[in-house]
Image (cartoon, rainbow, N blue to C red):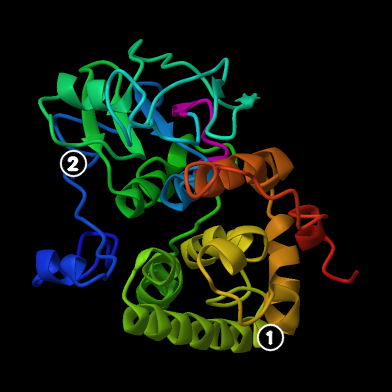
Amino acid sequence: VGIAGITTDDQANAAERRAAGEFVRGVSEARSLMESEEFPVESGPYHLYIAFNCPWCHRVAMVRAVLGLEDAVSMDVCFPSRTTVSDDRGENLWRFAPDGIVTQNGRHVSFPECTADTAGGKSYIVDIYAESGMNAARSVPILYDKVSRKVVNNESSEIMRMLETVMLPHAKRPINLYPELLREKVDEANTWIYTDINNGAYKAGFSSNQDVYETAFDTYFAALDKLNALVESNDFITGDAVTESDIRAFTTLWRHDPIYHNRMKLNQAFLHEYGGIWKWMGRMMAVPGLDSVSHAGILAQAKQGYFGRTGNGTIPVGPRGYPECYAQPGL
């Protein structure tokens, strides 16, 4: 548990649980915070490294976009498929490929949002960590200090919270996503959204143990029932205004129909079968700034990341109309 609530699985007997087929999320290593002597709150020095297919990265990018922090915090985007055994540096590494790569299905694929490392000139995320003396780390997102050339933090929930709070004075749209009067409700919602929906989707999709999968499956859809009831009576999860909890839930549910229903075997229902959630998805798509990081081009990267390095590497063409249909829940 970190400053932004539950950030990972229970680590008790993690090795044994993994060996038994359970997906157990690891612990983020870099946990420094802004508003310290080493990392003061400023506009300009800080930089994000993300990959849009990763939901933990995506939610950080969503907060940045909704608040309008693009000028205050710069950002680079990795290619959505990590390396394979054929890469000279080894497999499962995040890398920069602005010109694209030849993917597992034999096609050359590129995405306009993918960049080079404009802050440090590296080709692989592991090299950014190595410069900070973190030779075992390899995950994204990363909050990076361009002045000291150090990794500040790689826990998405804490990066979100810093952008929402101490960086809020630098936002073009200073929406209070973590309002003081709602913090208890936001923290409570964040807990079950994380365990049952965000991480629950991964526990269902990446566990090889049938019992773990079925438990995660049931828990995930019970959480959707709970969410549906909340947003049938409120515009957003904690009331009439969007908060951090909505962004946390939206990041997973934006993936549900076109990716997780298939890839994570979460195939009990599509979102349109939940009247409250379907209308809430429309309200979320209308949040200013969110469209810049939730359009069809971003979904194409998410599909590439989830399907492009599993099985035969083919990318699903459908379902048609996503994510545009989320913005038109009346259709």
Depth order, front residue of 303/227: 303
Amino acid under label 2?
Ala
Depth order, front residue of 286/117: 117
- Which residues lie in the magenta part? 64-78
Residue identified by numbered label 1: 232
The image quadrant that residue 284 belongs to is bottom right
190 on left or right of 225: left
* Secondary element at image label 1: helix
Mark 2 surroundings within 10 Å by alpha-carbon count, few (fewer than 14), some (14 through 19), many (20 or more):
some
Q: Is residue 28 visible?
A: yes
Q: Residue at x 54, y 18 (%)?
A: 98
Residue identified by numbered label 2: 30
Quarter containing the N terminus: bottom left
Q: Residue at x 68, y 50 (%)?
A: 316
Q: Residue at x 49, y 58 (%)?
A: 177
Label 1 or label 2, whichever comes before in sequence order: 2
Depth order, front residue of 231/121: 121
Quarter containing the C terminus: bottom right
In x, y percent, where is residue 13? Answer: 8, 71
